[in-house]
Image: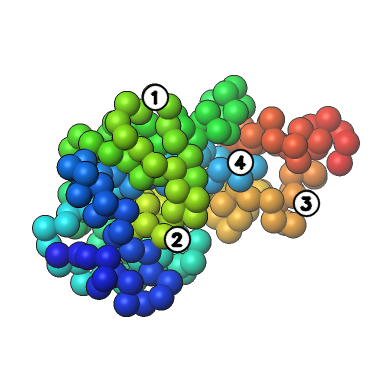
Amino acid sequence: MVTSSNMSSRRSAPTAERELLMLERGLWPVVGVDEAGRGALAGPVVAGAVVADWSSDISWCHDVRDSKELSPAAREQLYGLIMAHAQSAAVGVVGSEVIDKIGIVGATRKAMYAAIRGLSVRPRAALIDWMVVPQLHIPQEGIVRGDSLCFSIACASIIAKVTRDRLMVEFDSQYPEYGFRNNKGYATAHHMERLFELGACPIHRTTFQPVCLVLGGLL
């Protein structure tokens, strides 16, 4: 059984404190939710949703971190463990065309809602990194730096990040000139150089300022 005490033995590991508080309130199952790709210039925003299986001993729990703190190899390994041992896990993907229509905040919430709806169990509460999802009609808590603090959210961040990275590698085969395999759509120097030279491709977010400026001939 995972507890907040055995999960906090390593200082920077996320804990299960908030999940246990939900359990004490009778709000169970609880889902952790996070996104990947919110700040990218190209590609989708992807949300992960994870309901941990608290009935078993999760020996690898101390390795779980905010996905940004992990190497690609560590993320892939933990992705497999989370998918194998979670009570339920799902992703929601919202593409660049929708991001341009409704904005990144709306698109992020849409992806999160889709991820939660994709779960095989119905959660009674949600713990979400940074924000809340208005269309989700269950108790929810938006937690600042939730992916660093909360075990379920950290698991969701890994699911979202690995899924999105895999998608960007697929996009790299379609648009190899932009280096999506390496930059994952973020504004690296090489990506910006190629964007300036070639213009935008179909998965670029045309409402994001750097892309707007390139398309408008201002960069």
| Amino acid bearing label 2 | Ser
- The x, y position of residue 74, in whole percent, is 39, 69
The residues tagged by marks 1 and 3 sit, at their Cα atoms, a distance apart of 39 Å
**Residue 97 visible in rendering:** no
Closer to the camera in the image, 197 or 51: 51
> Which of label 4 and label 3 is nearer to you?
4
Residue behind mark 2: 148
**Kind of element beneath mark 2:** helix
Q: Is residue 141 above or below residue 82?
A: above
Residue assigned mark 1: 135
Left or right side of 176 for 29: left
Rendered-image quadrant of the N terminus: bottom left
The residue positioned 11% from the left and 58% from the top of the image is: 55
Q: Earlier in the sequence, mark 4 or mark 3?
A: 4
Mark 1: few, some, or many residues within 10 Å (few <14, many ≥20)?
A: few
> Is residue 217 visible to us here?
yes
Which residue is label 4 attached to?
A: 42
- According to the picture, the residue beneath numbered tag 3 turns out to be 193
Measuring 60% from the left and 28% from the top, which residue is drawn there? 103
Horizontal side of residue 55 vs 141, given as left or right: left
How far apart, in angstroms, are the residues tagged by discs 2 and 1?
A: 25 Å
Determine whether the residue tagged by mark 1 lies in a helix, strand or loop: loop
